[in-house]
Image (cartoon, rainbow, N blue to C red):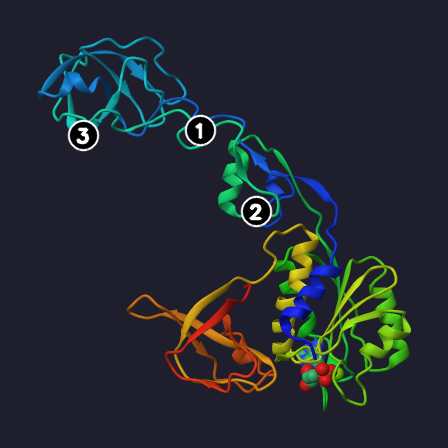
Amino acid sequence: MIPVAEAIQIVREKTSQLDSESVPLTDALGRMLSEDIIADTDLPPFDRSQMDGYAVRAADVQNVPARLAIAGESAAGQGWHHEMHAGDAVRIMTGAPVPLGADSVQQVELTREVDEGKVVEILEPVSLGRSIVRRGNEIRAGETVLHAGEQINAAMIAVLASFGYASVRVGAQPRVAVLATGSELVAVDQKPGRDQIRDSNNYSIRAYAMLAGARVELFPLAGDEISSLKNQIAAAVERSDVLVTSGGVSMGVYDFTKAALRELGAEILFERVALRPGKPTVFARLPNGVLIFGLPGNPVSVSVTFNLFARTSLLLMQGATEPLLKEEWAVLARGLKGSPDRESYLPAKLTTNDQGHLLAEALKWGGSSDFVAFAQATALIILPAGVKALEEGARVKVVRLPR
Ligand code: AMP
Ligand code: MG
Protein backbone atom coordinates (compact mmCIF):
# COMPACT_ATOMS: atom_id res chain seq x y z
CA MET A 1 0.00 0.00 0.00
CA ILE A 2 1.44 3.39 -0.99
CA PRO A 3 0.41 6.82 0.36
CA VAL A 4 -1.94 8.94 -1.74
CA ALA A 5 0.74 11.57 -2.35
CA GLU A 6 3.12 8.94 -3.70
CA ALA A 7 0.41 7.53 -6.00
CA ILE A 8 -0.30 11.03 -7.34
CA GLN A 9 3.44 11.52 -7.88
CA ILE A 10 3.58 8.32 -9.95
CA VAL A 11 0.63 9.52 -12.03
CA ARG A 12 2.43 12.82 -12.63
CA GLU A 13 5.63 11.08 -13.69
CA LYS A 14 3.96 8.68 -16.09
CA THR A 15 1.71 11.24 -17.80
CA SER A 16 2.98 13.05 -20.88
CA GLN A 17 1.55 16.20 -22.34
CA LEU A 18 -0.37 15.83 -25.61
CA ASP A 19 0.18 18.12 -28.60
CA SER A 20 -1.51 21.47 -28.77
CA GLU A 21 -4.02 22.59 -31.38
CA SER A 22 -5.58 25.82 -32.52
CA VAL A 23 -9.32 26.33 -31.88
CA PRO A 24 -11.66 29.21 -32.69
CA LEU A 25 -12.32 31.50 -29.73
CA THR A 26 -15.95 30.31 -29.70
CA ASP A 27 -14.75 26.77 -28.91
CA ALA A 28 -12.15 27.74 -26.33
CA LEU A 29 -14.23 27.70 -23.13
CA GLY A 30 -12.92 25.09 -20.69
CA ARG A 31 -9.84 24.30 -22.77
CA MET A 32 -6.27 24.57 -21.45
CA LEU A 33 -4.18 27.43 -22.81
CA SER A 34 -0.97 26.23 -24.39
CA GLU A 35 0.40 29.66 -25.25
CA ASP A 36 0.99 32.79 -23.18
CA ILE A 37 -1.48 35.51 -24.13
CA ILE A 38 0.15 38.85 -24.91
CA ALA A 39 -1.58 42.21 -25.02
CA ASP A 40 -1.25 43.71 -28.51
CA THR A 41 -2.55 47.14 -27.42
CA ASP A 42 -2.51 49.35 -24.37
CA LEU A 43 -5.72 49.18 -22.37
CA PRO A 44 -7.34 51.55 -22.37
CA PRO A 45 -5.86 52.47 -25.77
CA PHE A 46 -6.43 56.21 -25.04
CA ASP A 47 -7.25 58.37 -21.99
CA ARG A 48 -10.84 57.22 -21.47
CA SER A 49 -13.78 58.85 -19.72
CA GLN A 50 -15.48 56.74 -17.07
CA MET A 51 -18.58 58.92 -16.98
CA ASP A 52 -21.06 60.75 -19.12
CA GLY A 53 -20.39 64.41 -18.41
CA TYR A 54 -18.01 67.22 -19.36
CA ALA A 55 -14.26 67.13 -19.91
CA VAL A 56 -12.85 70.20 -18.15
CA ARG A 57 -9.76 71.65 -16.58
CA ALA A 58 -10.05 71.11 -12.83
CA ALA A 59 -8.58 74.57 -12.18
CA ASP A 60 -11.46 76.18 -14.13
CA VAL A 61 -14.14 74.73 -11.86
CA GLN A 62 -12.84 75.32 -8.35
CA ASN A 63 -15.34 78.19 -7.85
CA VAL A 64 -18.83 76.99 -8.64
CA PRO A 65 -21.07 77.35 -10.41
CA ALA A 66 -18.46 77.75 -13.20
CA ARG A 67 -19.64 78.75 -16.70
CA LEU A 68 -17.67 77.07 -19.50
CA ALA A 69 -18.16 77.31 -23.26
CA ILE A 70 -18.99 73.93 -24.85
CA ALA A 71 -16.33 73.49 -27.54
CA GLY A 72 -17.48 70.13 -28.90
CA GLU A 73 -18.51 66.59 -28.16
CA SER A 74 -16.51 63.36 -27.69
CA ALA A 75 -18.51 60.16 -28.06
CA ALA A 76 -17.42 56.53 -27.77
CA GLY A 77 -15.98 55.59 -31.15
CA GLN A 78 -16.03 59.23 -32.33
CA GLY A 79 -13.69 61.44 -30.32
CA TRP A 80 -13.16 65.19 -30.48
CA HIS A 81 -9.59 65.52 -31.67
CA HIS A 82 -8.72 69.15 -31.06
CA GLU A 83 -7.05 70.88 -28.18
CA MET A 84 -9.43 72.11 -25.51
CA HIS A 85 -8.58 75.56 -24.17
CA ALA A 86 -8.93 77.07 -20.72
CA GLY A 87 -12.50 78.17 -20.05
CA ASP A 88 -13.91 75.50 -22.36
CA ALA A 89 -15.61 72.16 -21.77
CA VAL A 90 -16.25 69.21 -24.06
CA ARG A 91 -19.40 67.15 -23.72
CA ILE A 92 -18.16 63.56 -23.23
CA MET A 93 -19.65 60.06 -23.02
CA THR A 94 -18.56 56.97 -21.10
CA GLY A 95 -15.82 55.15 -23.05
CA ALA A 96 -14.95 58.20 -25.18
CA PRO A 97 -11.42 59.66 -25.49
CA VAL A 98 -10.64 62.64 -23.26
CA PRO A 99 -9.52 65.58 -25.44
CA LEU A 100 -6.07 67.07 -25.20
CA GLY A 101 -6.09 69.99 -22.77
CA ALA A 102 -8.74 68.50 -20.46
CA ASP A 103 -7.55 66.96 -17.20
CA SER A 104 -10.80 65.87 -15.49
CA VAL A 105 -14.36 64.84 -16.20
CA GLN A 106 -17.31 66.11 -14.22
CA GLN A 107 -20.32 63.78 -14.28
CA VAL A 108 -23.41 65.06 -16.04
CA GLU A 109 -25.53 64.94 -12.87
CA LEU A 110 -23.42 67.78 -11.40
CA THR A 111 -23.79 70.05 -14.44
CA ARG A 112 -26.47 72.04 -16.28
CA GLU A 113 -26.48 73.17 -19.92
CA VAL A 114 -27.66 76.70 -20.58
CA ASP A 115 -27.78 79.15 -23.50
CA GLU A 116 -29.20 76.56 -25.93
CA GLY A 117 -26.35 74.16 -25.31
CA LYS A 118 -23.55 76.66 -25.89
CA VAL A 119 -22.57 76.87 -22.24
CA VAL A 120 -22.39 74.41 -19.38
CA GLU A 121 -22.57 75.30 -15.71
CA ILE A 122 -20.41 73.02 -13.59
CA LEU A 123 -22.14 72.85 -10.20
CA GLU A 124 -19.45 71.08 -8.15
CA PRO A 125 -15.63 71.28 -8.32
CA VAL A 126 -13.72 68.19 -9.54
CA SER A 127 -10.41 66.85 -8.35
CA LEU A 128 -7.61 66.63 -10.89
CA GLY A 129 -7.85 63.48 -13.02
CA ARG A 130 -11.39 62.67 -11.86
CA SER A 131 -13.21 59.98 -13.92
CA ILE A 132 -10.34 59.51 -16.39
CA VAL A 133 -8.62 56.15 -16.88
CA ARG A 134 -5.22 56.90 -18.38
CA ARG A 135 -3.97 55.12 -21.47
CA GLY A 136 -2.24 51.85 -20.51
CA ASN A 137 -3.43 52.06 -16.92
CA GLU A 138 -4.93 48.54 -17.04
CA ILE A 139 -2.45 46.83 -19.36
CA ARG A 140 0.47 47.89 -21.54
CA ALA A 141 1.04 46.41 -24.99
CA GLY A 142 3.50 43.52 -24.77
CA GLU A 143 2.50 42.41 -21.26
CA THR A 144 1.56 38.78 -20.65
CA VAL A 145 -2.05 38.74 -19.54
CA LEU A 146 -2.76 34.98 -19.34
CA HIS A 147 -0.37 32.07 -19.04
CA ALA A 148 -0.03 28.70 -20.75
CA GLY A 149 -1.43 26.02 -18.49
CA GLU A 150 -4.44 28.01 -17.29
CA GLN A 151 -7.91 26.68 -18.00
CA ILE A 152 -9.95 29.15 -20.06
CA ASN A 153 -13.00 30.44 -18.20
CA ALA A 154 -15.73 32.82 -19.30
CA ALA A 155 -13.93 35.92 -18.00
CA MET A 156 -10.76 34.92 -19.86
CA ILE A 157 -12.75 34.72 -23.11
CA ALA A 158 -13.17 38.52 -22.91
CA VAL A 159 -9.41 38.95 -22.47
CA LEU A 160 -8.70 36.75 -25.50
CA ALA A 161 -11.24 38.66 -27.60
CA SER A 162 -9.87 42.06 -26.55
CA PHE A 163 -6.37 41.21 -27.68
CA GLY A 164 -7.43 39.80 -31.03
CA TYR A 165 -7.23 36.08 -30.42
CA ALA A 166 -9.82 34.93 -32.98
CA SER A 167 -8.24 31.53 -32.47
CA VAL A 168 -6.10 30.30 -29.63
CA ARG A 169 -3.69 27.42 -29.03
CA VAL A 170 -4.91 24.91 -26.45
CA GLY A 171 -3.92 21.44 -25.32
CA ALA A 172 -5.49 18.63 -27.34
CA GLN A 173 -8.32 16.88 -25.53
CA PRO A 174 -7.37 13.46 -24.18
CA ARG A 175 -9.47 10.65 -25.64
CA VAL A 176 -10.84 8.59 -22.79
CA ALA A 177 -12.37 5.13 -23.13
CA VAL A 178 -14.68 4.07 -20.31
CA LEU A 179 -15.43 0.44 -19.53
CA ALA A 180 -17.48 -0.93 -16.63
CA THR A 181 -16.90 -4.50 -15.48
CA GLY A 182 -19.31 -6.66 -13.50
CA SER A 183 -21.67 -9.49 -14.36
CA GLU A 184 -24.36 -7.85 -12.23
CA LEU A 185 -24.60 -4.80 -14.47
CA VAL A 186 -27.34 -3.95 -16.93
CA ALA A 187 -27.63 -0.92 -19.17
CA VAL A 188 -29.42 2.20 -18.00
CA ASP A 189 -32.43 1.55 -20.26
CA GLN A 190 -32.95 -1.99 -18.88
CA LYS A 191 -34.99 -3.14 -15.90
CA PRO A 192 -32.54 -4.96 -13.62
CA GLY A 193 -33.43 -8.62 -13.11
CA ARG A 194 -32.90 -10.56 -9.92
CA ASP A 195 -29.39 -9.91 -8.53
CA GLN A 196 -28.73 -7.18 -11.06
CA ILE A 197 -28.17 -3.41 -10.86
CA ARG A 198 -27.96 -0.68 -13.47
CA ASP A 199 -24.51 0.53 -14.43
CA SER A 200 -23.95 4.05 -13.14
CA ASN A 201 -20.16 4.24 -13.14
CA ASN A 202 -19.81 4.58 -16.91
CA TYR A 203 -21.95 7.68 -16.77
CA SER A 204 -20.38 9.29 -13.74
CA ILE A 205 -16.88 8.62 -15.09
CA ARG A 206 -17.94 10.11 -18.41
CA ALA A 207 -19.24 13.20 -16.63
CA TYR A 208 -16.10 13.68 -14.52
CA ALA A 209 -13.86 13.09 -17.54
CA MET A 210 -15.77 15.72 -19.48
CA LEU A 211 -15.36 18.15 -16.58
CA ALA A 212 -11.63 17.42 -16.87
CA GLY A 213 -11.70 18.40 -20.55
CA ALA A 214 -11.60 14.92 -22.12
CA ARG A 215 -13.46 13.46 -25.09
CA VAL A 216 -15.15 10.33 -23.90
CA GLU A 217 -16.28 7.10 -25.51
CA LEU A 218 -18.35 4.58 -23.54
CA PHE A 219 -17.81 0.90 -24.34
CA PRO A 220 -20.29 -1.95 -23.93
CA LEU A 221 -20.55 -3.41 -20.44
CA ALA A 222 -17.94 -6.06 -19.72
CA GLY A 223 -18.72 -9.04 -17.55
CA ASP A 224 -16.36 -10.75 -15.13
CA GLU A 225 -14.87 -13.27 -17.53
CA ILE A 226 -11.17 -12.86 -18.09
CA SER A 227 -10.83 -13.61 -21.80
CA SER A 228 -13.74 -11.43 -22.91
CA LEU A 229 -12.58 -8.71 -20.52
CA LYS A 230 -9.18 -8.85 -22.19
CA ASN A 231 -10.73 -8.49 -25.64
CA GLN A 232 -12.91 -5.61 -24.55
CA ILE A 233 -9.98 -3.76 -22.99
CA ALA A 234 -7.94 -4.31 -26.16
CA ALA A 235 -10.78 -2.90 -28.27
CA ALA A 236 -11.32 0.06 -25.94
CA VAL A 237 -7.70 1.25 -26.05
CA GLU A 238 -7.37 1.16 -29.84
CA ARG A 239 -8.08 4.85 -30.28
CA SER A 240 -7.69 6.37 -26.86
CA ASP A 241 -5.04 7.95 -24.66
CA VAL A 242 -6.55 6.75 -21.42
CA LEU A 243 -8.78 3.87 -20.35
CA VAL A 244 -10.83 4.15 -17.17
CA THR A 245 -12.37 0.92 -15.93
CA SER A 246 -14.53 0.37 -12.88
CA GLY A 247 -14.91 -2.74 -10.79
CA GLY A 248 -13.03 -6.00 -10.65
CA VAL A 249 -9.95 -4.78 -8.77
CA SER A 250 -10.77 -6.07 -5.27
CA MET A 251 -9.92 -9.41 -3.75
CA GLY A 252 -13.06 -11.24 -4.94
CA VAL A 253 -12.98 -14.51 -6.86
CA TYR A 254 -14.28 -12.68 -9.98
CA ASP A 255 -12.03 -9.63 -9.83
CA PHE A 256 -10.09 -10.03 -13.06
CA THR A 257 -9.23 -6.55 -14.24
CA LYS A 258 -5.58 -6.74 -13.16
CA ALA A 259 -5.14 -10.23 -14.57
CA ALA A 260 -6.56 -9.12 -17.92
CA LEU A 261 -4.24 -6.10 -17.93
CA ARG A 262 -1.22 -8.26 -17.15
CA GLU A 263 -2.09 -10.63 -19.97
CA LEU A 264 -2.17 -7.63 -22.31
CA GLY A 265 1.39 -6.82 -21.23
CA ALA A 266 0.51 -3.86 -19.01
CA GLU A 267 2.99 -2.60 -16.47
CA ILE A 268 1.18 -2.18 -13.15
CA LEU A 269 2.43 1.11 -11.66
CA PHE A 270 0.47 0.86 -8.44
CA GLU A 271 -2.37 -1.32 -7.23
CA ARG A 272 -3.06 -0.48 -3.59
CA VAL A 273 -3.31 3.00 -2.18
CA ALA A 274 -3.60 3.96 1.49
CA LEU A 275 -6.89 5.66 0.71
CA ARG A 276 -10.42 5.39 2.11
CA PRO A 277 -12.47 4.84 0.01
CA GLY A 278 -10.47 3.55 -2.94
CA LYS A 279 -7.78 1.25 -1.60
CA PRO A 280 -7.67 -1.21 -4.55
CA THR A 281 -7.18 1.49 -7.23
CA VAL A 282 -4.93 0.35 -10.09
CA PHE A 283 -2.75 2.50 -12.30
CA ALA A 284 -1.11 0.78 -15.25
CA ARG A 285 0.41 1.42 -18.65
CA LEU A 286 0.04 -0.71 -21.75
CA PRO A 287 2.98 -1.34 -24.08
CA ASN A 288 1.47 1.16 -26.56
CA GLY A 289 1.60 3.90 -23.89
CA VAL A 290 -2.12 4.03 -23.07
CA LEU A 291 -2.60 4.80 -19.38
CA ILE A 292 -5.15 2.79 -17.44
CA PHE A 293 -7.00 3.75 -14.31
CA GLY A 294 -8.64 0.66 -12.83
CA LEU A 295 -11.06 2.15 -10.33
CA PRO A 296 -12.93 0.14 -7.70
CA GLY A 297 -16.59 -0.57 -8.49
CA ASN A 298 -18.24 1.31 -5.67
CA PRO A 299 -19.70 4.51 -7.12
CA VAL A 300 -18.35 6.75 -4.37
CA SER A 301 -14.89 5.21 -4.62
CA VAL A 302 -15.11 5.89 -8.35
CA SER A 303 -15.68 9.56 -7.75
CA VAL A 304 -12.88 9.91 -5.20
CA THR A 305 -10.29 7.92 -7.11
CA PHE A 306 -11.16 9.43 -10.48
CA ASN A 307 -10.74 12.96 -9.17
CA LEU A 308 -7.52 12.24 -7.29
CA PHE A 309 -5.73 10.28 -10.01
CA ALA A 310 -7.40 10.21 -13.46
CA ARG A 311 -8.37 13.89 -13.38
CA THR A 312 -4.80 14.86 -12.52
CA SER A 313 -3.51 12.88 -15.46
CA LEU A 314 -6.08 14.29 -17.91
CA LEU A 315 -5.30 17.87 -16.89
CA LEU A 316 -1.56 17.27 -17.20
CA MET A 317 -2.06 15.83 -20.69
CA GLN A 318 -3.58 19.17 -21.65
CA GLY A 319 -0.67 21.07 -20.10
CA ALA A 320 -2.30 22.28 -16.88
CA THR A 321 0.07 23.93 -14.42
CA GLU A 322 -2.34 23.22 -11.53
CA PRO A 323 -3.66 19.71 -12.09
CA LEU A 324 -4.56 18.93 -8.47
CA LEU A 325 -7.80 19.62 -6.64
CA LYS A 326 -7.16 22.77 -4.61
CA GLU A 327 -7.01 22.18 -0.85
CA GLU A 328 -8.74 24.61 1.50
CA TRP A 329 -9.14 24.78 5.26
CA ALA A 330 -12.54 24.29 6.87
CA VAL A 331 -13.96 23.70 10.33
CA LEU A 332 -15.74 20.44 11.12
CA ALA A 333 -19.47 20.84 11.76
CA ARG A 334 -19.60 17.40 13.36
CA GLY A 335 -17.03 14.99 14.79
CA LEU A 336 -15.49 12.36 12.51
CA LYS A 337 -13.59 9.09 12.74
CA GLY A 338 -10.42 8.48 10.76
CA SER A 339 -8.62 5.33 9.71
CA PRO A 340 -5.45 3.97 11.36
CA ASP A 341 -3.58 3.24 8.15
CA ARG A 342 -5.32 5.10 5.32
CA GLU A 343 -5.90 8.71 4.37
CA SER A 344 -9.67 9.37 4.30
CA TYR A 345 -11.54 11.43 1.71
CA LEU A 346 -15.00 11.75 3.19
CA PRO A 347 -18.00 13.19 1.31
CA ALA A 348 -19.20 16.44 2.84
CA LYS A 349 -21.29 19.53 2.36
CA LEU A 350 -19.65 22.94 2.67
CA THR A 351 -21.43 25.90 4.22
CA THR A 352 -20.32 29.06 6.02
CA ASN A 353 -21.14 30.05 9.58
CA ASP A 354 -21.93 33.51 10.99
CA GLN A 355 -18.24 34.26 11.53
CA GLY A 356 -17.64 33.65 7.83
CA HIS A 357 -15.75 30.40 8.41
CA LEU A 358 -16.03 27.57 5.93
CA LEU A 359 -17.82 24.65 7.63
CA ALA A 360 -17.51 21.06 6.45
CA GLU A 361 -20.26 18.67 7.43
CA ALA A 362 -19.61 15.03 6.64
CA LEU A 363 -22.61 13.39 4.99
CA LYS A 364 -24.55 10.82 6.93
CA TRP A 365 -24.18 8.02 4.48
CA GLY A 366 -24.11 4.28 4.16
CA GLY A 367 -20.53 3.90 2.96
CA SER A 368 -18.87 3.89 -0.42
CA SER A 369 -21.87 2.34 -2.19
CA ASP A 370 -24.25 5.11 -1.11
CA PHE A 371 -24.21 7.19 -4.26
CA VAL A 372 -27.65 8.68 -3.58
CA ALA A 373 -26.35 10.37 -0.41
CA PHE A 374 -23.14 11.21 -2.27
CA ALA A 375 -25.12 13.24 -4.82
CA GLN A 376 -25.49 15.89 -2.09
CA ALA A 377 -21.73 16.13 -1.49
CA THR A 378 -19.93 19.24 -2.66
CA ALA A 379 -16.52 18.43 -1.19
CA LEU A 380 -14.32 15.80 0.41
CA ILE A 381 -12.90 16.13 3.90
CA ILE A 382 -9.30 14.92 4.06
CA LEU A 383 -8.25 13.12 7.24
CA PRO A 384 -4.61 12.05 7.38
CA ALA A 385 -3.89 8.38 8.08
CA GLY A 386 -3.57 7.66 11.79
CA VAL A 387 -5.97 10.36 12.97
CA LYS A 388 -8.33 8.38 15.21
CA ALA A 389 -11.10 10.94 15.57
CA LEU A 390 -11.65 14.68 15.29
CA GLU A 391 -14.12 16.72 17.34
CA GLU A 392 -16.61 19.25 16.08
CA GLY A 393 -14.74 22.54 15.53
CA ALA A 394 -11.47 20.92 14.46
CA ARG A 395 -9.68 22.41 11.44
CA VAL A 396 -9.55 20.08 8.44
CA LYS A 397 -8.43 20.25 4.84
CA VAL A 398 -11.11 19.91 2.19
CA VAL A 399 -11.19 19.75 -1.59
CA ARG A 400 -14.21 20.77 -3.63
CA LEU A 401 -15.60 18.13 -5.97
CA PRO A 402 -15.77 19.09 -9.65
CA ARG A 403 -19.45 19.53 -10.44
P1 AMP B 1 -16.31 -4.50 -7.45
O1 AMP B 1 -15.25 -3.48 -7.25
O2 AMP B 1 -16.38 -5.03 -8.84
O3 AMP B 1 -16.21 -5.58 -6.42
O4 AMP B 1 -17.68 -3.75 -7.18
C1 AMP B 1 -17.93 -3.17 -5.94
C2 AMP B 1 -19.37 -2.74 -5.82
O5 AMP B 1 -19.66 -1.73 -6.78
C3 AMP B 1 -20.37 -3.84 -6.08
O6 AMP B 1 -21.46 -3.68 -5.18
C4 AMP B 1 -20.82 -3.58 -7.48
O7 AMP B 1 -22.10 -4.09 -7.75
C5 AMP B 1 -20.78 -2.07 -7.57
N1 AMP B 1 -20.53 -1.69 -8.95
C6 AMP B 1 -19.55 -2.17 -9.72
N2 AMP B 1 -19.58 -1.63 -10.94
C7 AMP B 1 -20.64 -0.77 -10.95
C8 AMP B 1 -21.20 0.08 -11.94
N3 AMP B 1 -20.68 0.17 -13.15
N4 AMP B 1 -22.26 0.83 -11.59
C9 AMP B 1 -22.79 0.74 -10.36
N5 AMP B 1 -22.30 -0.04 -9.38
C10 AMP B 1 -21.24 -0.81 -9.67
MG1 MG C 1 -17.29 -6.49 -9.85
Respond yes or no on whether mark 2 lies under 8 Å from ligand 1.
no
Disc 1 residue type (three-letter): Leu
In terms of image quadrants, where is residue 224?
A: bottom right
Q: The residue tagged with tag 3: helix, strand or loop? A: helix
Decide: marks 1, 2 in contact (CB < 8 A)?
Answer: no
Please determine whether, in this image, residue 130 is positioned above or below residue 254.
above
The answer to whether mark 3 and mark 1 are in CB contact below 8 A is no
Image coords of residue 181 (percent x, y) = 77, 77
Q: Which comes sooner in the sequence, label 3 or label 1?
A: 1
Residue type at mark 2 is: Ile
Q: Position of residue 151 (x, y in %)?
A: 58, 49
Measured in 3D between alpha carbons, the distance from the residue under mark 2 to the one under mark 3, in whole angstroms, is 40 Å
Q: Which residue is mark 2?
A: 152
Pointer 1: what residue?
43
Mark 3 vs mark 1, foreground winner is 1
> In this picture, is 38 found above or below 267?
above
Q: Residue at x 90, y 74 (%)?
A: 263
Residue on which the image places disc 3: 109
Left or right of 85, for residue 348: right
The residue carrying pointer 1 sits among few (fewer than 14), some (14 to 19) or many (20 or more) residues within 10 Å by Cα, namely many
Alpha-carbon neighbours of circle 2 within 10 Å: few (<14), some, or many (≥20)? some
